[in-house]
Amino acid sequence: MSAAARRHRPFGHWSPEPGQPWVIAGPCSAESLDQVLETARALKADGRTQLFRAGVWKPRTRPGAFEGAGYNALEWLQIMRTEVGLPFVIEVGNPQHVERALAAKADAVWVGARTTVNPFYVQEIAEALKGSQIPVLVKNPIHADVGLWLGALERLDKMGLSDLAAVHRGFFATHPEPYRNDPRWELTFELRRQVPDLPIFCDPSHIAGQRDLVESVSQIAMDLALDGLMIEIHPQPDEALSDATQQLTPARFAALLDRLARYLEHADPGAVSTRLSSDRDQLDQIDAQLVELIQHRQEIVERLAHRKLELGASVFQMDRWLDMLDQRESQAAKLGLDPNYVKAFFELVHRYSVQHQAAIYQEQRREEA
């Protein structure tokens, strides 16, 4: 992203109270004027929501589901802003949506996960937004690809849209239990590494998929120093026309905000560095030893590859791999470690080991040919 984008203005020009997260809240979908007004009035009375969210056009996986109230919903949001006084943000999925959003003077727009995944769609939206200077949030693509996420932000930046923020809503996974979407928090770290000044919000509603998990995901997001939250609120969540299971009542939402702890906001960086320096030094020593052990392991892997070649054996030995994995998981359990953590570590080590051996096989055969 360009240097201009790194020097972004505070997103949307609205500021939360000191020590508080940015809060974007509202229903998954705008279903009626009464529902929009009832939700907005509750959020306004609470006083901690900076931006009211509501789906106007809802992309659904299959036809027949509620796909949003469309232009009527835009009118309801305009009425809400006049009567209640909350600015609003809506999702745009194509240039026609952008045209209507700008005509309605939406206070901000977001690009959804299904759109971020397609650079053609993002480019069309970016061109339609050119010259508007409207704040734009970009949700992560459905698939875990930081490049696509960053690319969408860059396309908007190239059109002169500098008021940008990212929204982390989790990623598709075959088995994301207990969540609806896999958080893959490390991808937010990588995005922040590449664009340090970009605000990154969390959408715990879409990560959780269940209202009972929304608070814990929100707390993790705050503990990881993300900049804010985008949470779905509905007066009667069980009756919602879309994503009923993940929406909170306004009262439950207020209680969630009351309990959120922002430890990092109150910590002095110098004091943190001093108090943690001894433990961090020990970790650095262990990490250095790990790298040396990995290097030694790699030498043995190379020796094994050449011996397998001499014997005419395959690179991958299923029985050996399963036996080794079972030993390490059992060892982890005895030491009080999470077996899944150890399993994931050794799966990564083994993957690179197999890849390295396969490369040695290919090189040897090229030389023989």
Image (cartoon, grey):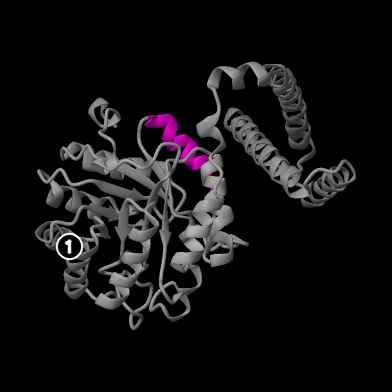
Q: Nearer the viewer, residue 59 or 45?
A: 45
Q: Nearer the viewer, residue 306 or 127?
A: 127
Left or right of residue 144, residue 342 in this image: right
- Residue 172 visible in the snapshot: no
**Residue nearer the viewer, 176 or 133:** 133
193 within the magenta span: yes
Tell me residue 45's x, y (percent).
36, 60
> From the viewer's perspective, is 257 left or right of 56?
right
> Which residue in the structure is indicated by mark 1?
82
Q: Secondary structure at mark 1?
A: helix
| Residue depicted at 54% across the width and 33% down the height | 264
Measuring from the top left, give residue 351's x and y in whole percent: 65, 41
Q: Report x, y in % for residue 315.
A: 71, 42
Up the image or down, 37 lies above or below 6; here it is: below
Q: Which residues are magenta?
A: 184-196
Amino acid type at mark 1: Thr
Among all residues in the image, which is located at the extreme bottom? Answer: 64
Residue shown at 36% from the left, 53% from the top: 49
